[in-house]
Image (cartoon, grey):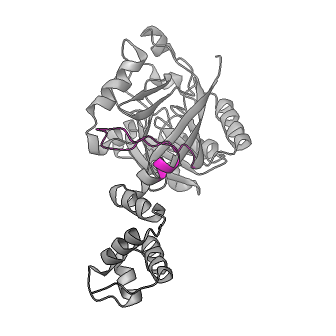
Amino acid sequence: MSFTASDERIREVLDYEQKHGTPATNDNFGFKSGDTIDRYHREAKKRGIHIAETSRVLKAIGDKYSPAELKAIANGARVTAGQSRIPTVNFTGEHIKIGYLTDTHLGSVYCNPDHIYAAFSEFEKEGVDFICHSGDVTEGMSHRPGHVYELTHIGYAAQKQHAIEVMGKAPAPLYMIDGNHDRWYIKSNGALIVQDIAEAIEHATFLGHDEGDINLGSSATLKMWHGEDGNSYAISYRIQKVVESLTGGEKPNIMLFGHVHKSLMMYERHIHCVGGGCIEQQSKWMRGKRIQAHTGFWILDVIVNESGVARFGGTWYPFYV
């Protein structure tokens, strides 16, 4: 049977098929046979009718890659032979600014609340979106001989009220976990001091004991961690061992570490790790154990997009005490 469609009709059908695909073309033009479009292509080739192949090529590419990979290709990624995934080259996204301080040890003679207020002032000036505190909000009360003489506020009630007054001045939403010093009240009488502090501050949230997670949109997670282990011979070693212990499916994108009073930023197992230092200055106990204190706080800059953390950086603000 001869093909009677005009050149214009062939161009119309095949142009439509380029833009909308074969099934939609069959429906639009009422073609009953699945071979009809192939006959149009053969006749176009026979007559020397040129049909732009751009849409067909793009559709073929689109069928092979995910939306994230297509976006990466559009932004300049290279398709390398043997490579199973397209590298993400999109470094733009939502900018999140985080104020980070830890180990305030409120109630200790070695904690200067003015340093906390200075951090809050900088957080407000820099416009942080929220503030993280990774434990040891309070000094607590241990059974160590002489510890009571190192306290400005003695007991659960006094330290709780002091912490509410100080941390309540935080200029942005405040997320906290508890640390080993806070948990002395749990061990002695079951009191949840950090949870009680957070409940008394309208814009504060208690995330958990020793660790807590914050979702940064749908593609990235921040984890705060305290722990009850000790300092390591190298500042980075403790963070490396904690990160090494995480199973693959539980790894966060960002992890903030308290407890050992060390400031550090490193990248381990694709996790952006930050040691938070401390607000409490070096105590006599720490000096006797030859443990240094990095007194200060962080402001972290995070760019999050559909692939996770696209960029990460931070500024350390030290107190020379």
Answer above or below: position of 280 versus 189. above
Residue 279: give x, y in percent of width and height: 57, 28
Residue 51: give x, y in percent of width and height: 47, 68
Answer above or below: position of 259 versus 24. above
Q: Residue at x 48, y 37 (%)?
A: 155
Q: Quadrant of residue 298?
A: top right
Q: Quadrant of the C terminus?
A: top right
Q: Is 299 or 117 nearer to us in this picture?
A: 299
Q: Quadrant of the N terminus?
A: bottom left
Q: Which residues are magenta?
A: 71-93
- Farthest residue toward the right? 125
Residue 9: give x, y in percent of width and height: 47, 83
Give left or right: position of 82 versus 11. Answer: left
Residue 259: give x, y in percent of width and height: 43, 28
Dominant secondary structure of the magenta stretch?
Answer: loop
Answer above or below: position of 270 versus 72. above
Q: Is 71 or 264 nearer to us in this picture?
A: 71
Q: Is residue 215 magenta?
A: no
Q: Is 116 or 67 nearer to us in this picture?
A: 67
Give left or right: position of 32 versus 20. Answer: left
- Residue 280 seen from this side: yes
What count of labels does the image hold?
0
Q: Is 173 or 268 nearer to us in this picture?
A: 268
